[in-house]
Image (cartoon, helix red, strand yellow):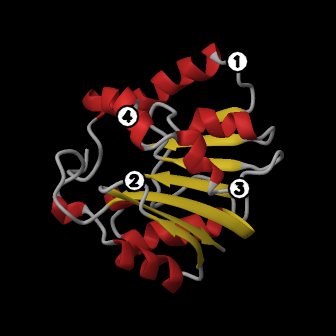
């Protein structure tokens, strides 16, 4: 496992009441403007914090991609419990998304792009799989010390993240600071 990758033994941190209060998934997903038939890809889906709410917003396919099989096992159980038949689990890396070009309408990249090395390759992959006019929701840690989150050296400043998207042909359509520790970017292809 890469030193940048989230340790699956801490998966309980991914979905807890404090996180839901600070970053309510439904409210954050509203910035992505998921339409009723959109095809959605959740990068680094983990245990489904955004996958499951996204599946409630669309009847289109929702792909949940994660590099860690243990995360996908937990998510598979949650998908079965909620009886979603349009969620597909995909094991893979953001640097090499195992999907066809121009396949999805919306992408969720929640707290995962700081793990991608190099970042530019991950953003090129996002662009490759997005349809024209498609959007990517990026949620990341501010580049400042906080009690939780990745080491400061792994964090990407919001200005650098915006620049990385723009240099790869995206237009920033939304930017916000939902908490003192996080930022949100919505980038359109």
Q: Are marks 4 and 3 in contact (CB under 8 Å)?
A: no
Q: How far apart are marks 4 and 2 (CA)?
A: 12 Å
Helix, strand or loop status at disc 3: loop
Per the model, the C-alpha gap separating discs 4 and 1 is 21 Å
Mark nearer the N terminus (4 vs 2) = 4
Q: Quadrant of residue 144?
A: bottom left
Q: What element carries label 1?
A: loop
What's the CA distance linking mark 3 and mark 2?
Answer: 20 Å
According to the picture, the residue beneath numbered tag 3 turns out to be: 33
Q: Name the residue under label 1.
A: 83
Q: Quadrant of the C terminus?
A: bottom right
Which of disc 3 and disc 4 is earlier in sequence?
A: 4
Q: In the rendered image, which residue does mark 2 sit on?
A: 112
Query: Which of the pair 27/63 is nearer the observer?
Result: 27
Q: Residue 14 carries which label?
A: 4
Using the numbered discs, state the Cα–Cα distance from disc 1 to disc 3 in whole angstroms: 23 Å
Residue ID at (35%, 70%): 118
Q: Which residue is drawn at 60% across and 32% down?
A: 52
* Residue at the spot 46% in from the left edge and 30% down from the top edge: 47
Crowd rating for badge 1 (residues with CA inside 10 Å; few <14, some 14–19, many 20+): few
Q: Nearer the viewer, mark 3 or mark 2?
A: 3
Residue 89 seen: no
Q: Give the residue displayed 68% in from the left and 33% down from the top.
A: 87
Looking at this view, is 173 or 133 the one in front?
173
């Amino acid at each position: 496992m890469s030193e940048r990758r989230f340790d699956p033994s801490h998966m309980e941190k991914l979905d807890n009441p404090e996180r839901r209060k600070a970053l309510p998934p439904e409210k954050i997903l509203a910035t992505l403007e998921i339409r009723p038939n959109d095809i959605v890809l959740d990068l680094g889906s983990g245990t489904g914090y955004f996958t499951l709410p996204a599946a409630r917003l669309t009847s289109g396919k929702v792909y949940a991609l994660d590099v860690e099989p243990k995360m996908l096992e937990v998510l598979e159980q949650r998908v079965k419990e909620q009886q979603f038949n349009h969620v597909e689990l995909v094991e893979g890396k953001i640097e090499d998304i195992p999907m066809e070009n121009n396949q999805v309408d919306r992408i969720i990249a929640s707290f995962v792009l700081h793990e991608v090395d190099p970042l530019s390759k991950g953003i090129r992959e996002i662009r490759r799989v997005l349809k024209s006019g498609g959007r990517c929701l990026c949620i990341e840690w501010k580049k400042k010390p906080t009690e939780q989150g990745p080491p400061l050296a792994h964090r990407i400043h919001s200005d650098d993240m915006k620049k990385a998207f723009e240099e790869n042909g995206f237009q920033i359509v939304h930017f916000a600071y939902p908490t003192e520790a996080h930022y949100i970017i919505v980038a359109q292809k």
